[in-house]
Image: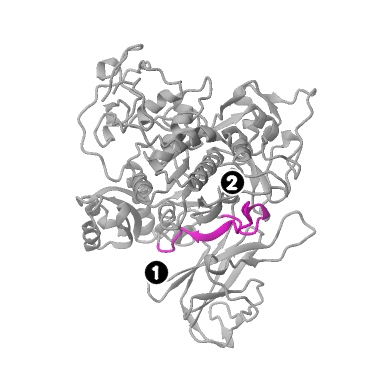
C-alpha cells in the first residue's frame, strides 16, 4: 500500500493524517534475525503465570492479599471462540469445565475451569484466544504535583499573575477546568442548540455512577439522566468472589416475626411473610462504617429489604427492587450536617438467580467506594455543575452505570460481561492494563471487536498511563475496533487545574501511553483533554492541586489521566450521534470512527505514536458524517516486526502496522528509504 494513498479508515494511512509520521523509515535498532517459532500461544505467558499462581494458592488453601476467602480450585476464563463455533461450548463443558455465560453473536464464552482442564480447553479447535480472570487496578488519577507542567518546562505562578479562581456557578460552559471546548464541542452546542446528546444513552463501564449527584440528575430536556445501574461483577467469577464485597449470598430460609441468627446470636425482627431468605455480612463502607449489614430477600418477587439503620429490624425498611424498575435508592448511614463530607452512602440493588448453587440467590448492594466512575460520567454528560452553566461534553445524554470495579480493582471478566446488553448507544471504559504483550489479539480484545461490529455500539477506552516509552499502550484499548484515547493538555488547563505556567499552547501529558502495539499496529487512535474538574460522590473526599490556591467542595474533584481523556471523546461522540439521529442518519461504528479519525486536529510537534491522528474535532467530524462520506477504503497491512516478543505474534515476526521495527538486515528499511507495504 503506498503511504500517500488517501483513505480515511485505514489505520496505516491515518498516521499520515496527523502529519507527524514520516513516510520514510525510522532508524531501526539492530535486531537479531527472526528465528522460527511455534504457533502463537492462545493463553500467553502472563495468563499462564497467573493461573500457576492461582493453582498454588488453591493447593495451599491460601488467599490473595485483601481477598475475602481462600482461592478456589478453579479459574474463570474469558474465551473467544471462532465465529459461529457454538459447538465449542459443548466441547468445553465435556472437559468438566462449567460454562457460566455464552454470547454466540460475539463469540464469547465464560468458563469456570478446574486447573487440570485448562490445557485441554486451549487445544480445542474452536478456541481462538483465552484470558484468565484477574484483578486489574484502576488508573491513579489523583492530582499529582509532579504533573504541574514540569514535564513541559512549566513553573508555578510568576507572582505577577494572580492564581486562578476555582470553578463556580459563574463558570461558563467553555472553560479550562472541564475543557470540553478544546474538542470544539462548546461552540458546536452553542451553534446547534439541540445537538447536545439528547436521544443518546452512554454506558459508563467503571466503578459506578453516583445516583444522587445533582449534576447527574437531569438532562437538558428535564429527563432523568441516570436510567439504570447494573453490575458486571458476578459472584460466580473467580476474581469477584474473592474481592467484590458488595455481593451477599442469600440462602438461609427464615420466618418472622423474630429470627435468631445462630452465627451471632442477634435477634432480628422480620415481616410475617412467606418465602424469606436472610443474610448478614460484614462490609466496610467509605463513610468509615464496618459491620454486618442484614439483607432479607423475598422469593415470590425478588424484592429485598436492607437493614439500612442497623437496628436489626426489617419491618421499617422499604421493599427495594433493581434501579431500572422504580429508580429506588437506599442509604447506608446517616449524614452529619456539621461535616463537609456526606456520611450517608447511597446504594442501588441487583438480584442474581443463576448462581453456581440453585439454593443461593445473589443480592448486590451497589454502593460506590471509589470516585473514578462518577468523575468519568460527569465528563461525558454532566449538566449544571456547581449549579451553573458548566456542563460535560453531552449534557443532553442519558447514562447507564455499568459497575465492574471497586476500591480494590476490577475483574477482567466483569469488564467483559458488563459490556453486553444494556441498551446503550456508546460506551466509555476508562480502565485497562499494561500487559507484556499488547498485539490486539487477546480474548477480550477480540470479543470487544465483535461486540462493536455486531451491536453497532462504539467503545472508547483510555490508552493507559504508562508513560512515554514506546509500546506502552494498554489492553484491550489495543483492539482494532476500539477507539483508543491518549491524554492531551493545554496551557490554559495547566494554569486552571495546576497553577502552572507553560509555553506550549497544547501538548501531550507525560503519563499518556504511547504506541505502537507489539505488532506495529497504530495506537492510540486520537487524543482528548486528560485533566478535568468533574462530579464525584459527596461521601468521598474531594481532590485538587494545592498550587492552584483553591479547594473544591464535596461532590467535585480534579483528576487527570487517560481515564479523563476517554470520556471527553465518548461524550463528543454522543454529540455526533445526537446530531445524526436528529438528521435521520444512522452511522455505523466504522463510519463514526472514520469521521473522527479523518477530522482529528494534529498537535504540533507531537509524534504519531503519542497522539494518534490528533485531537478530537467535533465540528470537523460532524461535517464528515453530515456529508455521508462513509468509511473510505478498507486496507490491510502486513509488515515485518522485530522485537524481543515478535515471535509470539499470531504470524511470527509479522504484524499489521506501519511501524517497522526491523533493522535493514532483517527486513527493515534504511533511514530515508521509502517502501510500499501490502
Q: Position of residue 175 (x, y in %)?
A: 68, 36
Please give the name of the residue rendered at 45% of the width and 57% of the height, measured from the top-left corner: 423
Dot 2 corresponds to which residue?
A: 194
Identify the residue under disc 1. 355
Residue shown at 58%/85% (left/top)?
271
Res. 251 mark: none
Residue 87 vs 27, above or below: the answer is below
**Residue 348 x/y as whole percent:** 57, 65
Other residues around mark 2 within 10 Å, as few (<14) / some (14–19) / many (≥20): some
Callout 1: SS: loop
Q: Identify whether 595 is placed above or below 91.
A: above
Q: How many numbered marks does the figure carry?
A: 2
Q: Nearer the viewer, residue 620 or 10?
A: 620
Query: What's drawn in magenta, residue-wise?
Result: 209-236
Query: What is the magenta segment's predominant secondary structure?
Result: loop
Colour scheme employed for the rendering of this structure: one colour
Residue 181 in the image, given as x and y percentages of width and height: 62, 35
- Between the residue at mark 1 and the residue at mark 2, the CA separation in whole angstroms equals 45 Å
Residue at image point 37% right, 33% down: 9
**Could you say where residue 293 lies in the image, as x and y percent from the top left?**
59, 70
Report if residue 663 is visible in the image: yes
Decide if residue 616 is on the left or right side of residue 391. Answer: left
Find residue 500 and report its image quarter: top right
301 part of magenta stretch: no
Mark 1: give few (<14), some (14-19) or many (20+) Cα within 10 Å: some
Quadrant location of the C terminus in the rendered image: top left
Element under disc 2: loop
Image quadrant holding the N terminus, namely top left
- Is 229 part of what is drawn in magenta? yes
Snapshot quadrant of residue 213: bottom right
**Mark in front: 1 vs 2:** 2
Amino acid at each position: 500500500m503506498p503511504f500517500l494513498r488517501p483513505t480515511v479508515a485505514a489505520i496505516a494511512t491515518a498516521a499520515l493524517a496527523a502529519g507527524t509520521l514520516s513516510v520514510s523509515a525510522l532508524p531501526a535498532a539492530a535486531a537479531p534475525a527472526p528465528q522460527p517459532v511455534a504457533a502463537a500461544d492462545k493463553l500467553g505467558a502472563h495468563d499462564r503465570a497467573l493461573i500457576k499462581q492461582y493453582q498454588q494458592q488453591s493447593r495451599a488453601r491460601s488467599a490473595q492479599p485483601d481477598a475475602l476467602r481462600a482461592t478456589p480450585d478453579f479459574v474463570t476464563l474469558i474465551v473467544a471462540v471462532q465465529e459461529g463455533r457454538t459447538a465449542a461450548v459443548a466441547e468445553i463443558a465435556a472437559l468438566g469445565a462449567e460454562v457460566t455465560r455464552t454470547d454466540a453473536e460475539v463469540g464469547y464464552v465464560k468458563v469456570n475451569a478446574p486447573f487440570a482442564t485448562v490445557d485441554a480447553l486451549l487445544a480445542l479447535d474452536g478456541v481462538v484466544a483465552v484470558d484468565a480472570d484477574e484483578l486489574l487496578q484502576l488508573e491513579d488519577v489523583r492530582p499529582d504535583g509532579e504533573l504541574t507542567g514540569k514535564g513541559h518546562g512549566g513553573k508555578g505562578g510568576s507572582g505577577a499573575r494572580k492564581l486562578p479562581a476555582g470553578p463556580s456557578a459563574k463558570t461558563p460552559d467553555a472553560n479550562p477546568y472541564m475543557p470540553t471546548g478544546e474538542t470544539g464541542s462548546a461552540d458546536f452546542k452553542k451553534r446547534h442548540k439541540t445537538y447536545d446528546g439528547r436521544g443518546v444513552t452512554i454506558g459508563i463501564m467503571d466503578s459506578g455512577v453516583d445516583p444522587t449527584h445533582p449534576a447527574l440528575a437531569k438532562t437538558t430536556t428535564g429527563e432523568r439522566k441516570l436510567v439504570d445501574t447494573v453490575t458486571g461483577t458476578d459472584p460466580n467469577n473467580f476474581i469477584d468472589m474473592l474481592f467484590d464485597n458488595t455481593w451477599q449470598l442469600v440462602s438461609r430460609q427464615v420466618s418472622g416475626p423474630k429470627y435468631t441468627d445462630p452465627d451471632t446470636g442477634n435477634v432480628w425482627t422480620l415481616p410475617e411473610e412467606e418465602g424469606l431468605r436472610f443474610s448478614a455480612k460484614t462490609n466496610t463502607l467509605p463513610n468509615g462504617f464496618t459491620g454486618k449489614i442484614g439483607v432479607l430477600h423475598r422469593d415470590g418477587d425478588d424484592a429485598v429489604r436492607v437493614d439500612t439503620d442497623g437496628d436489626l429490624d426489617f419491618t421499617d425498611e422499604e421493599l427495594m427492587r433493581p434501579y431500572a424498575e422504580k429508580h429506588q435508592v437506599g442509604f447506608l448511614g446517616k449524614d452529619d450536617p456539621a461535616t463537609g463530607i456526606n456520611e450517608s452512602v447511597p446504594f442501588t440493588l441487583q438480584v442474581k438467580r443463576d448462581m453456581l448453587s440453585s439454593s443461593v440467590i445473589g443480592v448486590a448492594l451497589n454502593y460506590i467506594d471509589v470516585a473514578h466512575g462518577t468523575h468519568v460520567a460527569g465528563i461525558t454528560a454532566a449538566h449544571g455543575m456547581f449549579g451553573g452553566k458548566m456542563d460535560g461534553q453531552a449534557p443532553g445524554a442519558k447514562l447507564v452505570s455499568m459497575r465492574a470495579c471497586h476500591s480494590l480493582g476490577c475483574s477482567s471478566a466483569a469488564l467483559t460481561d458488563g459490556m453486553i446488553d444494556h441498551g446503550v448507544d456508546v460506551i466509555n471504559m476508562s480502565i485497562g492494563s499494561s500487559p507484556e504483550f499488547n498485539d490486539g489479539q487477546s480474548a477480550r480484545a477480540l470479543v470487544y471487536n465483535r461486540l462493536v461490529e455486531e451491536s453497532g455500539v462504539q467503545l472508547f477506552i483510555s490508552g493507559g498511563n504508562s508513560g512515554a516509552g514506546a509500546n506502552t499502550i494498554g489492553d484491550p484499548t489495543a483492539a482494532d475496533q476500539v477507539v483508543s484515547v491518549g491524554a492531551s493538555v493545554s496551557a490554559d488547563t495547566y494554569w486552571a487545574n495546576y497553577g502552572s505556567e507553560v509555553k506550549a499552547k497544547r501538548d501531550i501529558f507525560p503519563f499518556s501511553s504511547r504506541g505502537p502495539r507489539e505488532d506495529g499496529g497504530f495506537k492510540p487512535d486520537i487524543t482528548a483533554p486528560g485533566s478535568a474538574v468533574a462530579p464525584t460522590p459527596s461521601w468521598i473526599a474531594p481532590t485538587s492541586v494545592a498550587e492552584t490556591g483553591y479547594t473544591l467542595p464535596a461532590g467535585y474533584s480534579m483528576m487527570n489521566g487517560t481515564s479523563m481523556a476517554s470520556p471527553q471523546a465518548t461524550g463528543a461522540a454522543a454529540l455526533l450521534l445526537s446530531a445524526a439521529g436528529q438528521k435521520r442518519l444512522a452511522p455505523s461504528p466504522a463510519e463514526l470512527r472514520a469521521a473522527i479519525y479523518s477530522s482529528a486536529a494534529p498537535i504540533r510537534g507531537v509524534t504519531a505514536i503519542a497522539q494518534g491522528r490528533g485531537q478530537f474535532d467535533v465540528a470537523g467530524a460532524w461535517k464528515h458524517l453530515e456529508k455521508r462520506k462513509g468509511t473510505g477504503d478498507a486496507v490491510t497491512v502486513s509488515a515485518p516486526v522485530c522485537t524481543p516478543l515478535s515471535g509470539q505474534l499470531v504470524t511470527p515476526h509479522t504484524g499489521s502496522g506501519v511501524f517497522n521495527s526491523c533493522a535493514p538486515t532483517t527486513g527493515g528499511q534504511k533511514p530515508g528509504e521509502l517502501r510500499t507495504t501490502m
